[in-house]
Each structure stands twice: as structure tokens, then as C-alpha cells.
Image (spheres, rainbow, N blue to C red):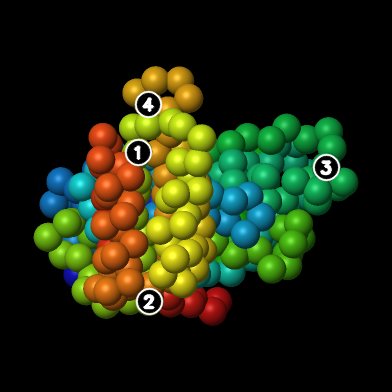
Amino acid sequence: MQVVTLGPAGTYSHRAARAISDDVAFRESVSAIVAAVDGGEYDRGVVPIENSIEGSVTETLDAIADAELSVTQEVITPIRHALLAQSPNFDTIASHSQALAQCRAYLEREYPDHALEAVASTARGVERARSDATVAGIGHPDNAGDDLTVVAEDIQDRSSNATRFFVVAPTAAPCDVGGKSIVLVYPSANYPGLLLELLEAFADRDINLSRIESRPSGNRLGDYLFHVDFEAGLYEDRAQAALDDIEAIAADGWVKRLGSYDKRHVLY
């Protein structure tokens, strides 16, 4: 099975993808990954959905909302950021915007006058450091190789830093098992108590919501859709009953049942 994820080789996405398959291809953006799976080019895609420090990855939320995909698995990987450079003498620090944000306190304390450069991935930042002695990259310490020095390790603001990834597949290959599920809800409505009605559909069935997040629908200002993760499988009677209520509430909009999934941890 071939998996596509954020590249180049050495990204945290690559580490998560290797838990799914050894045959990994790369794209430069989440949107490109989702499009490649949606178009049938790859069997699976691995995309970051949430970080324990910086929260949800909005590019992923919007990309999966616009595509026809299923979510088949969740992969959790610890994030160990290191500062990598040819020498201590650099004036720019390059990495993915999420990595820069996850190390904000360290960078403001240790390198307040250095320029910060956002690039497509942590691995791209390390490549910049490898090709330019004036640039340091933020990435996993294993990415240093033989030509870069680990200037500092574990520079993330919190030691518990971890990222959650979704494994996405074409809609023809949904997962029929799993203890968690995700649905997208577009009510195409806005009135007092709307969100309460959506929440009560799950609460009345004793279903715990692990995440609910609103994103602009793109149709008009102030119009939103909801990403809802909950702790039950779509195959369960209680989940089906809750979603029947949700579909009635969103009768003027739509509900996408993206799939059920289980969790896998990457411990390195």
C-alpha cells in the first residue's frame, strides 16, 4: 500500500506515515495530499490534524471538508524539536510555521534578534540549514545526519508536545470498525440554541465529544460548518440515532460521515 504525506523525507508526517506503510511518497502541502488521495492516485494519505500546543491544523480541516474521503485511522506521534545548524553562527531559523510556534518561548528567549523563516515542512527547514551556513533548521534530532550539529535538543515549549494525524482513504475504502468517529455538519442555519441541539443529540445517547470545531463554510460571512469527533463507532445504534437527529437539524445543509477509526502511537 502506497501512502502520501508531507515531504520531503524526515518530516514528522513521514514518521507517522511509516507506521502505516514503508512505501511513502511526498507532497508539499496538505491540500495536495488530500487531492492525490481523493483522485485515486494513492491508497492512503497521512495529514496532521491537531497539535497539543498549537491546536487544530486549519489547512487540514478545510481540505478534508472539500474532498470526498474517509478517515480510517489516527496516529499520535511525539514531537521532539531540535535546533540544527552547520555551526552556532547563524542568523535565520527556518522551519514549518507550526514548529516555529511550538518553540516560540525558546526562540524568543535564546534568539530574539534572529529572523524566523516559515517553510513547507520541518524537513525543508533542515534542508535550508544543510545548504546555507547562515540558516538553522528546527526538526527531529535524527535529521542532523553527518553534516549538521544539534545546537539544542527538546526546544519545544512543552515536553508533552504531540501531533495527531489522520489516515485518509478514498470513500470506497472506509473503515468499518473503530471506537472513535468524525462527522462534518453544515446546518446552513443560524438561530439561538442551534449548537445546543447538535450537542444534545450526542449527550442524550451518552456519547462523549472529544473535539468540536467550527470553520467558515466559505459561502458567506458568519456561516459555519462543524467538525465533530466523538467516542463511538458509526456502526453503533446510539451513534446512528444521534446522527439521525443531526441530519434532521441540518435538513437545509448536509452531514458527512467521514468514518470510524482507532488510535495508533508512534513511540520514537
Mark number, residue 108: 3
Sooner in the amino-acid sequence: mark 1 or mark 2: 2
Mark number, residue 218: 4
Picture quadrant of residue 21: bottom left
Q: As drawn, is 113 to the left or to the right of 178?
A: right
Q: Secondary structure at mark 3?
A: helix
Q: Amino acid at mark 2?
A: Gly
Residue at screen point 63% across, 35% down: 117
- 182 up-or-down from 207: above or below: above
Residue at screen point 31% across, 55% down: 245
Q: Amino acid at mark 4?
A: Gly
Q: Dot 1: few (<14), some (14–19), or many (≥20) neighbours within 10 Å?
A: many
Residue at screen point 49% across, 76% down: 266
> Considering depth in this image, is 202 or 262 the residue closer to the camera?
202
Sooner in the amino-acid sequence: mark 3 or mark 1: 3
Residue at screen point 42% across, 75% down: 263
> Considering depth in this image, is 256 or 158 the residue closer to the camera?
256
- 65 up-or-down from 85: above or below: above
Q: Dot 4: few (<14), some (14–19), or many (≥20) neighbours within 10 Å?
A: few
Say whether residue 221 is visible: yes
- In which quadrant will I find the C terminus? bottom right
Q: Secondary structure at mark 2?
A: loop
On the image, numbered disc 2 is attached to which residue?
179
Gap between marks 3 and 1 measured at Cα: 42 Å
Q: Dot 3: few (<14), some (14–19), or many (≥20) neighbours within 10 Å?
A: few
On the image, numbered disc 1 is attached to which residue?
187
Q: Dot 2: few (<14), some (14–19), or many (≥20) neighbours within 10 Å?
A: some
Gap between marks 2 and 4 measured at Cα: 31 Å
Q: Position of residue 158 (x, y in %)?
A: 74, 62
Q: As drawn, is 13 to the left or to the right of 154?
A: left
